[in-house]
């Protein structure tokens, strides 16, 4: 079975949607700062975000590992448990960082802005999902799962700025 990372790299529709509006770049896996998990669990940067953020696999294994996102402002949170979940999430709510209330209403407001510039947004998303062989959750389910992963499942995934031994703030600390 082909890995999802390989599938993204080989399917132009998927790579294009994940690059924008998903803001997910497999060619940018290096984090600007030296970091580690407080638990000592291994971290592997594998993708980047245009504003300087990094997606990390946590622990040992393959694409089923938990995924932590660290932004360039000293905030980090677990965002998915496995690459399939992350990609489904990025396909459904690529504007997730601006949807801090995790509500469908806010997500739809944000989507409206994207639809002005990308009128075929949903068709592009559906082609990307089909190319990757992913079924898509509803918007409400994707947002609820992100909230659960970031505020409950992710409590044990504390990213630390290594030179100062200081933990990053949680991306969604006001919800925890």
Image: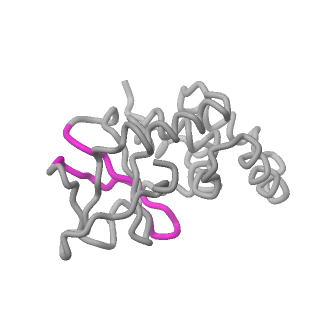
Pick the front one: 131 or 66: 66
Depth check: 155 or 117 in front?
A: 155
- Image quarter of residue 45: bottom left
Question: Disc count in the image?
Answer: 0
Q: Is residue 63 above or below residue 106?
A: above
Residue at horizontal 59%, vertical 25%? 135
- Does 74 appear above or below 77? below
Q: Residue at x 56, y 57 (%)?
A: 23
Relative to 140, is 42 on the left or the right? left
Q: Residue furthest bottom?
A: 164
For the point 60% across and 53% down, the residue is 100
Spot occupied by residue 118 in the image (x, y as percentages of width and height): 79, 54
Percent x, y of residue 79: 44, 45
Percent x, y of residue 160: 25, 63
Residue 26 picture quarter: bottom left
> How is the model colour-coded?
one colour
User: Is residue 42 in the magenta section?
Assistant: yes
Q: Residue at x 58, y 56 (%)?
A: 97
Q: Residue furthest left?
A: 40
Instruction: Tell me which segment is drawn in magenta.
Output: 41-60
Does the magenta segment cover residue 135?
no
Give the side of residue 118 with respect to residue 88, left or right: right
Task: From the top left corner, tell me how far across and down residue 31 is, in percent.
Answer: 33, 66
Quadrant of the drawing holding the N terminus:
top left
């Amino acid at each position: 079975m082909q890995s999802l990372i390989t599938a993204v790299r080989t399917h132009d529709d998927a790579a294009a949607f994940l690059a924008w509006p998903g803001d997910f770049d497999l060619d940018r896996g290096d984090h600007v700062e030296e970091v580690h998990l407080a638990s000592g669990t291994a971290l592997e940067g594998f993708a980047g975000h245009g504003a300087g953020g990094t997606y990390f696999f946590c622990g040992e294994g393959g694409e089923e590992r938990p995924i932590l996102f660290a932004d360039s402002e000293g905030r980090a949170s677990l965002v998915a448990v496995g690459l399939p979940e992350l990609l489904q999430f990025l396909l459904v709510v690529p504007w997730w960082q601006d949807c801090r209330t995790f509500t469908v209403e806010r997500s739809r407001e944000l989507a409206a802005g994207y639809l002005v510039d990308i009128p075929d947004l949903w068709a592009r998303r559906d082609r990307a999902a089909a190319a990757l062989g992913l079924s898509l959750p509803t918007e409400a389910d994707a947002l609820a799962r992100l909230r659960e992963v970031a505020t409950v499942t992710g409590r044990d995934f504390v990213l630390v700025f290594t030179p100062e031994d200081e933990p990053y703030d949680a991306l969604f600390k006001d919800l925890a």
